[in-house]
Amino acid sequence: LFSNIKKEIDQSSWPVFLIYFYVFAESCQTNLNQLNRILLMGESTIIFPQTLSFLGWFPTTPVAAFLMVCAMVVPLATLLNVNSRWLRVLNFLSFFLVKGFIFSAGRFSHQYWPLLWTLFFFSLPETWNSELDQRWIRRSYLAALLSVVLFYTYAGIWKVFSGMLDGSIFRSDFAANTFSYYLLSHGKKSWLGDFFISHELFSYISFLAVILFQISSPLIFFKKNYFRIWPFLILAFHFASLLLLQINFFAAGLVAFTLTFWVPQNIVPVSMRKVEES
Amino acid sequence: MKSFAEKIRWCIFAVGLAGILIGPLFAFFFSKYPDEDRWYPLWANSLFAAFPSKARGFTLTFYRLDNDAFPSGRNFYEVFPTFEGGGLSPSTLIDLMGTAQRSQNMDRLKIARQKFEEHFFKEFNQVVYSIDWVEWTPVARYKSGVFEKKEELVVFQYQKRN
């Protein structure tokens, strides 16, 4: 099995393989849980809500279970053959629809947006063999990278803008108030959160640094050295937000780390490559 | 000359890229909370705050009648007022919560509530002729250093100038 997988992927599609591995692992974890709810607890309403109960003749439980199994089989098949475009398209649609179903009303957790965009752009090239469809591989990879980076840039811009709407960003208790409001309204408590709330100036400077980091993310396209440390900064950022506010956004962080850390050398511009071509 | 399939692929690529570039702008211009019935974008609050006389006409739309929640009738409430010129500002609320959280006792919460009401009257009187009463209804329970629930904000009744 593994030799077959190793034969499928080459140097350029290694991060692609990793991304689809995350999708497979995530699908298994989520959909097995949902399958448990559907089959053992009889909650097929996670797929077919109560508002559709007029479909009394419809066998909701087996169909919902079948959809959940398909949502695990498709990522596995894609993982075994990332060069099949139709499997990648099917994977994108399956991920999109199942996440929309589970989180209801087509609205799902923000941490899955970068992964969804990446799956969308990764389904465009005909193959991930770098010798065959090189230009589309390059375009798709850079578009996925751009979308993931803009995810963080827009987050930083929105922090600044919402702070400027009422002028609270110019006050030293901006960060402490933001943290305390979040922890209060979500009923959470963390040791680091208490520390940051009690030390206003420290948390303010840290928050400004985070905003600066988020807004300056597109610099990785222009600065070679920043491109190398950015994946570690993004992991540190997600780890800090987990400790401080108990926000688990590692589905986004792993995609960002993978796309920037294992970036294929034939995709990045020549000026960014680790080893210059002779 | 590109083939038909190649043109389709270019179209999908362009739509995806444009969506990622333009989508956040779209969300920015048309974002609103689910329980709000305002039609204008969020950032227009700052514009209305700059022109209070223009903003007066909009004030009524922020507070909706809910007799079921408040049986005494004619009580308006708003879950999260975002109007800078007329209602409470979110920053005020956040200040209150932050103060209460950092103070770590209920006495400070009372002081914060008092300040909150003063601020509320000060801002609200600029738009509305008179206020009958303002009630602060905390539903948070203070236990082992943290509030367990979010607080219900404010219930108030007022008369409009005209």
Image (cartoon, rainbow, N blue to C red):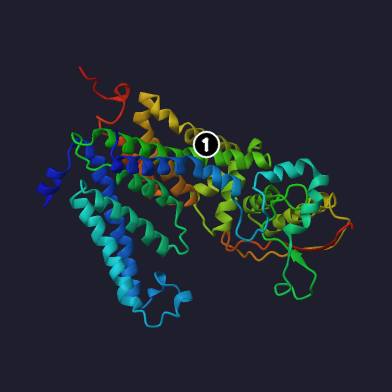
Q: Is residue A263 visible?
A: no
Q: Nearer the viewer, residue B121 or A148?
A: A148
Q: What residue lies at 65% left-to-right and 38% top-to-bottom?
A: A164
Q: Nearer the viewer, residue B15 or B29?
A: B15
| Residue density around tag 1, few if under 14, some if 14–19, many if 20 or more, within 10 Å | many
> Can you give x and y, in whole percent of width and height, for residue A123 in the image?
30, 46
In screen coordinates, is A101 left or right of B160?
A: left
In screen coordinates, is A7 left or right of A21?
A: left
Q: Nearer the viewer, residue A74 or A31?
A: A74
Q: Nearer the viewer, residue B105 or B15?
A: B15
User: Is A146 placed above or below A53 here?
Assistant: above
Task: Say which element carries label 1.
Answer: helix
Q: What residue lies at 56% left-to-right and 41% top-to-bottom?
A: A158
Q: Quadrant of the C terminus of chain B?
A: bottom right
> Can you give x and y, in whole percent of width and height, for residue A173 in the image?
63, 41
Amino acid type shown at disc 1:
Ile
Q: Is residue B121 visible?
A: yes
Residue farthest bottom in this picture? A57
Residue farthest top in this picture? A278
Residue farthest front in this picture? B1
> Can you give x and y, in whole percent of width and height, for residue A156 in the image?
52, 39
According to the picture, the residue beneath numbered tag 1 turns out to be: A211
In screen coordinates, is A185 left or right of A258?
A: right
Q: Quadrant of the N terminus of chain B?
A: top left
Q: What residue lies at 43% left-to-right and 28% top-to-bottom?
A: A219
Q: What residue lies at 30% left-to-right and 59% top-to-bottom?
A: A27
